[in-house]
């Protein structure tokens, strides 16, 4: 594959490209030593690397990090941990199941049968015993699935009815939970501190109803010893899901509903780790380019951009942008002079950035190259406030936020977060406005026409 056609993959990776080694080690110790039952959360915006972080943690705990989607990187070493059994559950794949917790139990049953420490334990007493024990999980799943996620008040009736039809016995209120505890305990190695660690990924991608059902299932059925759950989640998305399912009928303000939903989530998950944002998005983007673009192009990019805050601090978005940058870099010839190369890099970055993240702006620009005049004026504060201080932002930019509000000169402009402290993880920040201001005199509408056409440059054209 040529230099101009390398594509950066968005698959989760075991390679520590975000320098999480210390955080993963800290989480491993916490998971190994916390009292059980315990529910931990790994919070991050979409694209922040939650799946990669959790896969790296799973590997450190001795789990096998393989599934249908594949996991990239890693050193190939298998870490042994006889006390820990890890289960991976992609909640999004099962969101359309009537009861996601039943799908979770079935997935636990399937993966338990492949864990070396468990297989080794049951070899001493025969494979039939392992199958019989795993069938216990299957029976529990059927019992839970007897009714679509009952609430706590219905568990006793459920247990009684199901047991009458299967074992002619009447169970107490906590019978299903007790059976689940006993089955898991019999599967785990007979070592102090043994536990199953269940990683639940993409919970925030599920429909609100499915996410709520799974959380309720964890609270009702899995509040048992020897169980640790690690939830990959965007807290804001999950809180909104809970709010819409539980508090939608309350006649209170949206902010109050959000707080109530946050308190509800805290009842289930009180231990949340928040993934740190990349400290220097430009530096990370540059490293990504070195893996996908020509070296002299990237060197010129570094000279042009420096260490400014010009890019979103989100690994997935930076990968996508790097792929677009490589594509657009093939649309215009690379200059010989250093200063011209710097401007070339900035033009390519602007075209790639708007194309990737702002479709509405791109389509206006693609249709009329002179739209760039309005875009540049907006980035320079000429379309934001009038003489009375009123907001006169154009309609196409009303949902976006510039990174600066003062425009007395680039040296005096202050980042928006020093004035309003917006969340840097928000998707409505137009990160490259500072770069557009810095290179304004070199960015004319005609300069972008080859990039707007988007076809690959051929020498001699």
Image: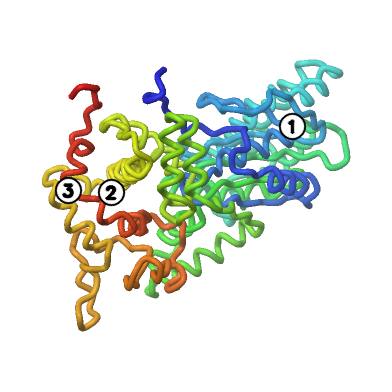
User: Which residue: 38% across, 74% down?
Assistant: 253
The residues bearing labels 1 and 3 have C-alpha atoms spaced at a distance of: 56 Å
The answer, for residue 398, to whether it is visible in the render is yes
**Residue 23 rendering spot, x and y as whole percentages:** 69, 48
Q: Which residue is mark 1?
A: 62
Q: Residues within 10 Å of mark 2 (few under 14, many from 20)?
A: some
Disc marking residue 358: 2
Residue located at (23% from left, 58% from top): 376
Give 39 or 379, whichever is nearer the viewer.
379
Mark 1 or 3, which is nearer the eye? Answer: 3
Of the numbered discs 1 and 3, the one sitting upstream in the chain is 1
Which of 22 and 31 lies nearest the eye of the viewer? 22
C-alpha separation, residue under disc 3 versus residue under disc 2: 18 Å
Question: Which residue matches tag 3?
Answer: 445
Name which quarter of the figure residue 379 lies in.
bottom left
Question: Image check: 458 left or right of 223?
Answer: left
Residue drawn at 65 percent across, 59 percent down: 270
């Amino acid at each position: 594959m040529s230099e101009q056609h390398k594509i950066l993959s968005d698959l989760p990776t075991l390679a520590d490209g975000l320098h999480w080694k210390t955080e993963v080690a800290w989480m491993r110790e916490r998971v190994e030593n916390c009292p059980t039952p315990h529910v931990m959360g790994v919070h991050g915006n979409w694209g922040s690397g939650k799946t990669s972080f959790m896969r790296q943690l799973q590997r450190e705990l001795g789990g096998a990090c393989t599934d249908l989607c594949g996991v990239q990187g890693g050193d190939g070493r298998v870490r042994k941990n006889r006390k820990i059994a890890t289960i991976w559950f992609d909640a999004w794949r099962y969101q359309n199941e009537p009861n996601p917790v039943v799908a979770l139990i079935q997935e636990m049953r399937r993966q338990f049968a492949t864990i070396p420490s468990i297989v080794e334990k049951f070899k001493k007493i025969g494979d039939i015993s392992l199958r019989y024990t795993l069938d216990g999980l299957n029976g529990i799943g059927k019992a839970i699935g007897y009714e679509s996620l009952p609430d706590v008040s219905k568990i006793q009736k459920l247990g009684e009815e199901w047991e009458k039809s299967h074992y002619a016995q009447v169970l107490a209120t906590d019978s299903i939970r007790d059976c689940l505890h006993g089955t898991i305990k019999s599967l785990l190695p007979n070592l102090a501190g043994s536990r199953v660690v269940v990683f639940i990924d993409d919970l925030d991608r599920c429909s609100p109803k499915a996410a709520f059902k799974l959380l309720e299932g964890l609270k009702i059925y899995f509040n048992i010893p020897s169980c640790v759950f690690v939830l990959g989640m965007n807290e804001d998305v999950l809180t909104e899901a809970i709010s819409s399912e539980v508090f939608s009928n309350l006649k209170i303000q949206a902010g109050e509903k959000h707080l109530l939903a946050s308190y509800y989530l805290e009842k289930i998950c009180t231990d949340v780790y928040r993934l740190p944002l990349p400290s220097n998005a430009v530096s990370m983007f540059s490293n990504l380019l070195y893996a996908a673009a020509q070296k002299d192009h990237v060197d010129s990019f570094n000279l042009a951009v420096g260490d400014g805050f010009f890019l979103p601090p989100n690994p997935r978005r930076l990968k996508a942008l790097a792929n677009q940058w490589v594509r657009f870099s093939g649309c215009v010839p690379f200059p010989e002079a250093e200063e011209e190369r710097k401007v070339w890099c900035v033009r390519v970055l602007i075209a790639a950035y708007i194309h990737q993240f702002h479709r509405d702006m791109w389509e206006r620009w693609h249709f009329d190259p002179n739209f760039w005049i309005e875009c540049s004026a907006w980035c320079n504060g000429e379309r934001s406030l009038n003489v009375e201080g009123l907001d006169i932002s154009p309609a196409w930019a009303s949902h976006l936020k510039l990174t600066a509000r003062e425009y007395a000169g680039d040296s005096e402009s202050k980042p928006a977060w020093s004035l309003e402290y917006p969340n840097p993880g928000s998707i409505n920040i137009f990160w490259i406005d500072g770069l557009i201001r810095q290179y304004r005199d070199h960015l004319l509408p005609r300069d972008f026409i080859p990039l707007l056409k988007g076809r690959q440059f051929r020498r001699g054209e």
